[in-house]
Amino acid sequence: MKKFWNWKKRVVNQENGQETEERILFMNGVIAEESWFDDDVTPALFKDELNAGTGDITLWINSPGGDCVAAAQIFNMLSEYPGKVTVKIDGLAASAASVIAMAGTEVWMSPVSMMMIHNPATIAWGDHTEMKKAMELLDAVKESIINAYVRKTGQSRAKLSHLMDAETWMDANKAVELGFADDILFQKEEQGDDSENGGSENNRTENGTGSSDSVMFSRRAVNNSLMNKLEKHYGKTGKSVKDQAGISAPKVNSVDTGRSADDLRERLNFIKKFI
């Protein structure tokens, strides 16, 4: 079994002079890279380690995602944990990892981190009945994931569904703006230094991020934009038309450069299979 999590402990000196022990959980890499579904050992091990101590937990996440069943169970375990769970995303919280992040009492993102949400995916084989079952399963899984996002963000199910359909990437500012995160790491310290140096607190926005700039990236929007540009530049082949000599030729929307947008699209789709 390959663990995708690691525990560490750190002694913290409080203002009253007492020492407390902080529990730190690192979650890196693919979630349940080997197996979690129908696995009685791995979930039980994670739960035992989670409940082996007491006190607040700081969870650092840098993961591209993975098994949605594993993410759901970890989300439930962290949500039921009696102590405070502070999630800190220092690199990437994508796909299933973003679901785990929603279990945090507070969610903080590094200024250079990203969060990505998208629709669940699976592999299916069989006749049309089996394909229909797979589609129904994916719909159900998507609804369960939306439950976690609604709980944290307060956004409507329709909006969250649209963001998942588009495979949406968010920087820290956008994640805070949409409610996926509560604040940005290191930001308050920087603002405090600016104030001491005569800086203005007006530089901070209402959501406390210290910046009004935010970025949200949609794979679908980028793909559509690229295809529109290709069609505009190279032209799109259409139905065949006959010239004055009666010879059939493909209809092109713009100047014929030797390759149509359809040819390029087919080539790009072929290349994507190997990326």
Image (cartoon, grey):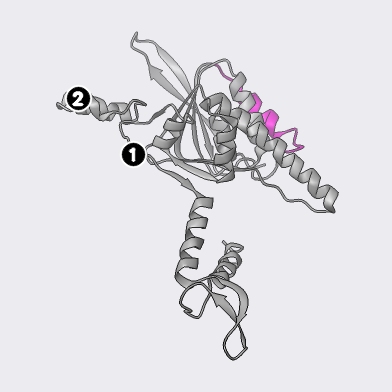
In three-dimensional space, the C-alpha distance between marks 2 and 1, rounded to whole angstroms, equals 21 Å
Q: Quadrant of residue 70?
A: top right
Query: Which quarter of the rendered picture does the C terminus lie within?
Result: bottom right
Residue 256 is situated, as x and y percent measured from the top left of the image, at: 48, 79
Q: Quadrant of residue 47?
A: top right
Residue at the image point whose x is 17% and y is 24% from the top: 196
Is 231 within the magenta? no
Residue 199 is situated, as x and y percent measured from the top left of the image, at: 17, 28
Is 129 rendered above or below residue 7?
below
Residue that numbered label 1 is attached to: 213
Q: Nearer the viewer, residue 193 or 125?
A: 125
Could you classify mark 2 by the number of other residues whose Cα lies within 10 Å: few (under 14), some (14-19), or many (20 or more)? few
Residue 170 is situated, as x and y percent measured from the top left of the image, at: 46, 41
Mark identifier at residue 195 = 2
Q: Earlier in the sequence, mark 2 or mark 1?
A: 2
Magenta extent: 36-54
**Which residue sits furthest front?**
244
Residue at the image point whose x is 46% and y is 32% from the top: 178
Look at the image and tell me whether residue 5 can be seen: no
Per the image, label 1 sits on a secondary structure element best described as: loop
Query: Which quarter of the rendered picture does the N terminus lie within?
Result: top right
Is 104 rendered above or below residue 109?
above
Could you classify mark 1 by the number of other residues whose Cα lies within 10 Å: few (under 14), some (14-19), or many (20 or more)? few
Q: Nearer the viewer, residue 52 or 218?
A: 218
Q: Are marks 2 and 1 in contact (CB under 8 Å)?
A: no
Residue 172 is situated, as x and y percent measured from the top left of the image, at: 41, 36
